[in-house]
Amino acid sequence: MVRKKKCVAMLLAGGQGSRLYALTNKIAKPAVSYGGKYRIIDFPLSNCVNSGIDTVGVLTQYQPLVLNDYIGNGQPWDLDRAFGGVHILSPYQGKLSSDWYKGTANAIYQNLHFLRQFDPEYVLVLSGDHIYKMDYSRMLNFHILHGADCTIAAIRVSPEEASRFGILNTEEDGRIYEFEEKPKKPKSTLASMGIYIFGAQKLYRYLEEDAKKKDSHNDFGKDVLPAMLAAGEKMYAYPFEGYWKDVGTIRSLYDANMDLLGDPPAFNVNDASWKIQSRSPLSPPQYLADTAKVNNSMVLSGCEIFGTVENSILSSNVVVKRGAIIRNSIVMADTVVGENAEIEYAIVDENTEIGDGVKIGERKESGKGIAVVARDLTVGKGAVIEGGAMVEKNVAAGEEVKK
Amino acid sequence: MKALGIVFSNIHDTNLPELVRMRTLASIPFGGRYRLIDFALSNMVNSGIDKVGVITKRNYRSLMDHVGSGKDWDLARKDGGLIILPPFGDRDSDGLYNSRLEALKSITGFLQHTDEDYVVMTDCDNVCRIDYNKVIEFHRINKADITLVYRKSSSEEDNAVTVTVTPEGRITNLKYESKIDGEQNVFANIYVMKRSLLRNLIMDSLASNYTHFTTDLLVTNLKAMRVMGFEHKGYFAAITSLQSYYERNMDLLDEKHRHELFGDRSVFTKIRDSVPTKYGACAVVKNSLIADGCLIEGTVENSVIFRGVKVARGSVVKNCILMQNTVLGENVTMNCMITDKDVVVRDMRVLSGSENHPFYVPKGTMI
């Protein structure tokens, strides 16, 4: 018997995420922390597993160390399988040619041999850029029911936002007749979510043809999908309703985190029917001292809190010393916040040491934006970091960092 | 020198009848996210012992569920790793041992088919951090036949075995006491000896018809053999009664004890995927240890809260231990309570034990 899989997912995780600036200096965008215990890639991976897809190729390229480490053998997502499971696919040297992944389509083209060993009927293409819960098996049923060659997940966006997205113009039954990439005057508000299902053989053919074109960007959105449409392939838009957030910018990442707070939250990760799995830290329970004040916040194990935390998200092992105040902020794992330090409207990345009396960020109302402190840094005593500033190197005691 | 680990999961069950009704002593929840066996296994693993047999007797489903394949302790190995030793019945017995010695008799095969020189045996009612390499080194230097780990008690304790230690470290007497007070040398329920000696002792005891390891075998051999005492000096939590279970949990609210046990983040436990804990807009939490996956909207003070606990608006929890998935409705008042897993307390209830007599609510109770 030849073993095969019905559907294999290919997760594009090689992007730098340059609009996250300091947060992706050392790590790839899908490895960026979210909601205290998650990394962005937990969402597509958990969605796959919850949708019954147990074979996932993760295409990495930019700063893959943290991401590879994190995925490991896939055990936290139950993706350590005898046949299938998660596979890290990095660019490689070949006998005839060796190349970096030139575009999203090229990344998958270079790994067609990976896909072929599972001989799937369908290929699901995902990106590691979004926070959402989605049942891909429903989308696959839709794809099969419509006899489609390609199905693109789509979500309604507001008319003002529509010009930031790839817009799909469809017939009444969902069949796509036109793409508009970031149109100035969008004809519809149905935006592509960057999630595609292809009939495997069709995908192989178009990727091979695309690879032969010298002037191609080797990109799904720019080249492969338009080529399929022009050739008259059956392409459908699968309408998705629910929470879906791009976390490609500092602002959108911040907002998506804050969507977890409040009662009820805009986005609920505590959903027994759709668990988001992640690699959990091995830390003792969090400790809140007599002097602690923690309100409307999410806090993870290993934290020790002696100060005040409001409307904030703390990842594992964060220490908040006496008198320190953290408001409307995100503080990532292993960071230490010194005594009487104040953090307001800011993102402080992993393993950073904030000295006593440091001031980071300013109230949202100041209009200066979100202050960001990158990972593995030291911010000396009494330093002041202005709202909207981006800190990428150590800050000396008493230093002032302007936006 | 390689050592084999043996963990007794059911010994001393009788000290904590309430908590072991549905589980082994080894799988009693402790410290917000752990089970007692986590400390025994973590000490083994952190001392480089990678073959550990866990002796079970009954009610060990919860234990099996907790340890699984042993991977969370890095004990899922091709060679060695975690080995559950269930009761072994033959024609003459039903396999349910009544003492440590009988338990050991039932695993002679396991003790034989292995090549480690030493054996480290521990119970699970002794929460501490200990490096067994140091104990084995002490054992070798002192040319001991058997080394027992002991520690100094500081306050009142129940169900203790006191040891008499000579200035050069030799143990001359062992004595069971139902209650002790003040500073005494107390056995920590950890044994180190050569594997070959353990096998011989078991064979001899079969011939002599001994039934108890400590009272028969050890005590009668204190003169004939060189039994040494290794003093453990760090934090030590003896879980020997419901009262001490309560107090030792509360110990962890003290930064010193907590950091000693968990400071280097090397106590392993089963990893579950809980969401981060959420604190509501009106939450007031003081001096408490809180696991992941909780939703705290009321007041919590001086308490240890396990994962998945919900404390609704207006509820006040003081000096309590709330185990996994305890759910408190609105305006509940609780003081000095221990709730086992899956307890539900409806709105407006008022429950109270006292500090020297915490009130225990069994698993799954609805109040």
Image (cartoon, coloured by chain):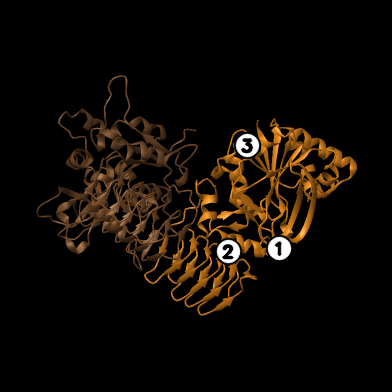
Chain colours: A brown, B orange
Answer yes or no: is residue B75 visible.
no
Between discs 1 and 3, the one toward the N terminus: 1
Which residue: 54% across, 50% down?
A: B260
Assess whether mark 3 and mark 1 are in contact (beta carbons under 8 angstroms). Answer: no
Per the rendering, the mark at residue B341 is: 2
- A27 w.r.t. B347: above or below: above
Per the rendering, the mark at residue B310 is: none
Residue pointed to by mark 3? B133
Q: CA distance from mark 1 to mark 2?
A: 16 Å
Between disc 3 and disc 2, the foreground one is 3
Q: Quadrant of residue B337?
A: bottom right
The amino acid beneath tag 3 is Asn
Between discs 3 and 2, the one toward the N terminus: 3
Labels 1 and 2 positioned on one and the same chain: yes
In the image as oriented, which residue stretches furthest toward the front?
B167
Which residue: 49% across, 56% down?
A: A285
